[in-house]
Image (tube, rainbow, N blue to C red):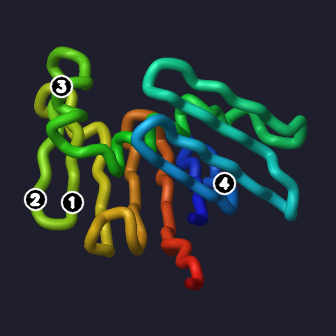
Amino acid sequence: QRLTVRELPAGAPPTERSLDVQLEVDDTELRLAAFALNQRVLMLRWDGRELQQQRHLMLPAEVDGARVLRDIQLAYWPREALATALPAGWSVDEQGQRRVIRMGDIVQMQIDYTGQPRWQGRAEIDNRLEHYRLSIESTPVTTSP
């Protein structure tokens, strides 16, 4: 995957950062390695209870492992799992290639997908609450026989 974050701070010009990411998910854990300038800058392991992370000194503080994990979950976890995990007053709805997360009646996050299944192609996350957009471009890894 390639993650591209575009921060949209009020009253300031937008900034953009990209990371190449390798993501593996199985029945026991999620593992993520992120690379910039051919160096590993972030390593995450999450077993459903504990998040372990290793960070490179050059990685900006804004790139937080818990936030990366949260965005992956919001984009790719099944709707039913998200609905039960969201705080009271929050909801998640899906229609076609769009997922919308609301607090009350206010849209806080909108995710648009180009692929089917959703983890193939591009997912565009518009996080209105935290003022950024995250693009996740996914290419499945194929292995030769």
- In the depicted structure, whether residue 50 falls above or below residue 93: above
Residue 92 horizontal side relative to residue 46, left or right: left
**Tag 2 or tag 3, which sits nearer the N-term?**
3
Marked residue nearer the N-terminal end (1 or 4): 4
On the image, the x and y values in percent for residue 95 come to 10, 59
The answer to which image quadrant residue 112 occupies is bottom left
**Residue matched to label 4:** 15
Q: Is residue 99 above or below residue 140?
A: above
Dots 3, 2 in contact, CB < 8 A: no
Residue type pointed to by label 2: Gln
| First of labels 3, 4 by sequence position | 4
Q: Which residue is at 40% across, 41% downward?
A: 27
Which mark is first along the chain, 1 or 3?
3
Q: Locate residue 40 relative to residue 89 in the image: left or right.
A: right
Q: Which residue is mark 2?
A: 95
Distance from disc 1 to disc 4, alpha carbons, whole Å, reads 25 Å
**Between marks 3 and 2, how big is the CA–CA gap?**
18 Å
For marks 3 and 4, give the one nearer the viewer: 3
Between marks 1 and 4 in the image, the one whose residue lies nearer the viewer: 1
Q: Position of residue 118 (x, y in %)?
A: 30, 64
The circle on residue 5 is none
Kindly check if marks 2 and 1 are in contact, taking CB atoms under 8 A apart as contact: yes
Label 4: which secondary element: strand
Mark 1 is on which residue type? Answer: Arg
Q: Secondary structure at mark 2?
A: strand
Circle number at residue 84 = 3
* Residue in view at x 86 percent, y 62 percent: 37
